[in-house]
Amino acid sequence: MNLHLKPSRRDILKGTGALVVAFSLTPPSEAFALAQGEAAAAKPVVLDQVDTFLAIDDKGMVTLYSGKVDLGTGIRIGLQQILAEELDVPLANVNTIEGDTALTPDQGPTYGSLSIQVGGMQIRQAAATARSALLDQAAQRLGAAKEDLAVADGVVTAKSGGGRIAYAELIGGKTFMLKVDPAAPAKSPADYKIVGKPIARRDIPEKLTGKFTYVQDFRVPGMLHGSVVRPPTIGATLQSIDESSVKDIPGIVRVIRDGNFLAVVTETEWAAVRAAREIKTSWSKSETLPDQAKLWEHVRSTKIVKDDVTSNIGDSAAAMAAGGKIVKATYDFAIHTHGSIGPSCAVAEFKDGKLTCWSASQATHNLRKQLAMMMKMPDEDVRCIYIDGAGCYGRNGHEDAAADATLLAKIMEKPVRVQWSRADEHGWDPKGPPTLIDLRANIDASGNVTAWESEFFIPQGAAGMVDLVAATLSDRPVVGKLAPGGIANDSAIGYKFPNIKTVCHRLETTPFRPSWIRTPGRMQNTFANESFFDEIAAALNADPLELRVRYTDPADKRGLEVLDRLAKVAKWEKRASPRKDIKGDVVQGRGVSYVKYELVRTYVGLVADVDVDRTSGDVRVRRVYVVHDCGQIINPNGVRSQIEGSVIQTVSRTLKEEVMFDRGMITSLDWASYPILRFSELPELVIELIDRPTEKPWGAGEPTAALVSSAISNAIFDATGARVRSVPFKPEKVKAALRST
Amino acid sequence: MKVSLHVNGKSQEIDVADPSTPLLYVLRDNLGLHGPRFGCGLGQCGSCMVHVDGHATFSCVLPVTAVGDRKVTTLEGLMEGGKPSKLQQAFIDEEAAQCGYCISGMVMQAQALLNKTPNPTDDEIRRHMEPNLCRCGTHAAIMRAIKRAAVA
């Protein structure tokens, strides 16, 4: 490759303290065009450029530009490991800039267990391309053959002749101006020194000493504080405000109304909290919600706008009608909130007509488009920057807080920080929609499952942009489409029954603004599928783990290995459920669940041991065993902590969580009315990771969570003979199931 | 009004505009301490937890004017000679944080236990940590960290 130096100063990185000088590794005409073009005026963020993902400065320090952000999952160190490994630079030399629309690529929102699997592989390929180009250049400078070069710690050495040259000298402070080459050779996993190692996260020491900056800690000079005053019921209109009710609060600056968007702006944070609590307002009456006691009738009778047939194998209708033993059941899964421990927060500032917004959004590129739409500004005039917040577990309120701050900053002509209250978060973050599932199966006289049919009643829509509360309340432009996430995933099943039909009835509406919450749809759907599979096993008087093996594709060796190792680690005793020796008040049971996530990636098997108090209906999860195969493990600590978190959070969701509401509004607005798991309820965890260094890396943040509800339901059945088909498994539901057994 | 506070071994006079201001906001906004965090403002989650005369206390519901001459310690105040304390180091070594938003409160709560009971049983740890909420599901790692500090 010919080299043509084409330095040109770029100051667009001023905000990060970096200065990048163009340096071309591409042919002169293309480099010239790039340097002259509009694109050269800014750091590239397009996905096909090496410079989009990384830069190496003249000291050999490497900057990783990541569109995937660390939501507290540890993905930052994982992506750094991938980059350092592929470039052969010291891990300590790699720093990351994340989620900044001016500097980082749009690799899609940070969701769906895709940060390593998709984002990491884009980074790996950019690094492989960079490494190859650097070796080309080193070969020329050292007068050696490329094949004769070795790299260690960012220094290229010619194996014969002994010449050495550092990356810093080759490229330091200049840009690659090179397209990502999908064919650039990636390193052999056999040579990995950094990937696969349990390397410690860098943020944790700072988080343990109070040095870490969360978005909630972020301040800009001259900033005011804003609190929103939401309608007391969804859809209510603001009739009047008594501004005198807050005029004596020290630090009050202004009450702002824009349609039904109401906020107070103050000099101090506490004044904003007080003013939002104390302001006297009146709103119209609005009762838009269904009767919660009849929620499932409401869901079943909601208009279906389309059917998504997610699998159709053989002729299930004929097989269902062919005689045999029909098993059927209906499952439901309550509305959940994300429940971030730190309520959403954002800071916005307008300068020279341009907006900068700092938030913990998992999708800054999407947020940028939404804020631009709301403010009727060009996208180019909006910059969204990610700063870590409290864990969000999906699309929670951060984007809405960003919209609130934006609107207030525009009106005040000063930077404004908006910190949501606990009630704002519990009441107004978008919710995981209610899910209702009907299942049927047919078993022939020989004990073969001949047909499986399922119908999922779930809202229409996919991933996308969840409309901003501030835009809706102030009657500004919104996309206006439901965006619950990819909730039809895992409605289809992997078991090899001869006749299968799985259908998602997509509903016109759902009671609350929906969005994705960890394992969206996959959790609800797998709860029904894997519990109902157990009902079939019970009907056949078969061991539920063995029946899963029987109906798994024999060619699916990885799946079978997970089930085999699960049986061993959990010391699974082969027998049918329920157990035969049920006596006493507190009874023990165990349940199994298994998934090949979305039928195409991470394999997980899970066994739960539970105690059921038959008098009180209390369920206690004693122990959970997990066997997990996500292919190539980048950082086993990261995978393990994601599995632990998935189990603990989903035990909480399964046993305790349910958004409560009356006809106007959510009523579970704090931790007393929306309880989550506490230390006394913590199960013991036994986790076995299967590492496959030569396979592709897959996601680990969601798949385990898909299994927890069904494994617990199956364990309750094993313990008691009672089947609980409705999440959460609150004591009254367990007692009702016990009574009907 | 002027309020005098004893925080992390230092007495200081602080100008507070509103006497109803909870201690949390004074620590964070006036003193720039980021250990204690706002989580609920209701004394329900423990993110804001600090020690007041050695007792684990929700700083989000304690008016600053009610603190008086009691000694306030935050996460930052546990540091020993600029280094993490034994308990903080145990959390670091166990990587007992995911988002870490709750973790300051967890450490303060756990330290209060270890001050009274240097070698707690699992049940004692669970019971003592009961008021503090974590959403990431880091509880098991937190248990490991507390036990590590207890035996170290």
Image (spheres, rainbow, N blue to C red):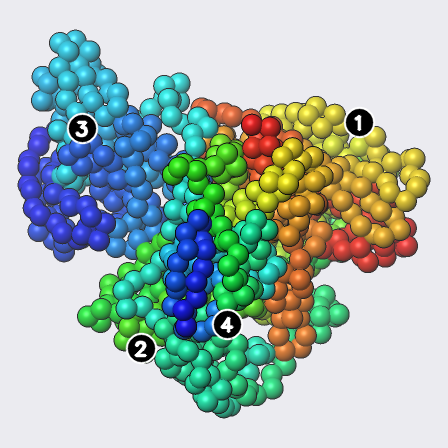
Q: Chain of mark 3?
A: A
| Both labels 4 and 3 in a single chain | no
| Both labels 1 and 2 in a single chain | yes
Q: Amino acid at mark 4?
A: Ser
Give the spatial CA distance, label 3 vs label 1: 58 Å
| Residue at the (76%, 27%) spot, across then down | A572
First in sequence: mark 1 or mark 2? 2
The residue identified by callout 1 is A573
Give residue A143's quadrant in the image.
top left
Please, is residue A579 above or below residue A555 in the view?
A: below
Which numbered dot is residue B20?
4
Give the spatial CA distance, label 4 vs label 1: 61 Å
Q: Chain of mark 2?
A: A
Q: Amino acid at mark 3?
A: Tyr
Secondary element at image label 2: helix
| Residue at the (51%, 26%) spot, across then down | A691
Please, is residue A14 above or below residue A286 in the view?
A: above
| Residue at the (76%, 44%) spot, across then down | A620
Is residue A513 something that shows in the picture? no
Q: Nearer the viewer, mark 4 or mark 2?
A: 4
Q: Chain of mark 1?
A: A
The residue identified by callout 3 is A167
**Neighbours of disc 1 within 10 Å: few (<14), some (14-19), many (20+):** few
Secondary element at image label 3: helix
